[in-house]
Amino acid sequence: MRSTLSGLIDTDLATFLESPVMIILGTGEEGMPEIGRGLGAAVQEDGTALQVIVSAWQWPGTVANARMNGRIAATFARPADYVTYQVKGRVDLVAPPTPALRACAMRYATRISAALAELGLAPERTAPWRSDRDLVALRIRPEQVFVQTPGPRAGSLVAERRG
């Protein structure tokens, strides 16, 4: 049974996406793939929008592709056990982060650093993944959500927008 949000992202999935998970963003233009890392996420608009904060300085190709064609696959993987979900959709807004989203990014940076340190990765080693230079927020409108956790359910559809 889905928890109480009206969009594709229910409350349980929202809690996961907003937790200290690795955020990998896949975009592309004319068959040229580009990846980037997110610096935190916030589920909004009752689960119909997902904001992911990105360093445009560090991941300029990802941000350019989001602006150009909007297609994106955002993968969220918990490093302790590899529980993973992928949200596919369209970016419909690229903008400077609000103060609340900037605070979300800073909390995320602290929390993911601690989570990775517990797994033996020193914070100075993962610091390049947490750049807060030239932050932008990508507002994603989810179209599909997949389980990507290794195992028999990997690749299975969790939710899909109809119509």
Image: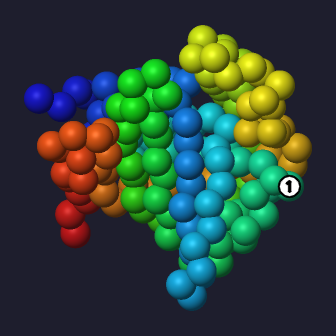
Q: Residue 129's image quarter?
A: top right
- Report the residue at 55% width, 24% height from top: 20
Numbered disc total = 1
Q: Is residue 24 above or below residue 125?
A: below
Query: In the image shown, does 121 or 134 lie closer to the viewer?
Result: 121
Q: Position of residue 44 (x, y in %)?
A: 48, 38
Q: Which residue lies furthest to the front in this view?
A: 120
Query: Please, is residue 141 above or below residue 28 in the view?
Result: above
In this view, the residue farthest toward the left is 1
Q: Position of residue 95 (x, y in %)?
A: 73, 55
Against 71, is 99 above or below?
Answer: above
Q: Quadrant of the C terminus?
A: bottom left
State which quarter of the image contains the N terminus.
Answer: top left
* Residue at image point 74% right, 20% down: 122
Asked if residue 104 shows in the view, the reply is yes
Q: Is residue 34 left or right of residue 3?
A: right
User: Residue 97's x, y, as percent?
Assistant: 74, 43
Q: Name the residue tied to disc 1.
A: 57
State left or right for residue 22 relative to residue 160: right
Residue lying furthest bottom in this view? Answer: 30
Three-letter amino acid code at the position of disc 1: Trp
Choose between 84 and 64: the one closer to the eye: 84
| Left or right placement of residue 29 versus residue 45 in this view | right
Residue sitting at 65 percent across and 47 percent down? 37
SS of the residue at dot 1? loop
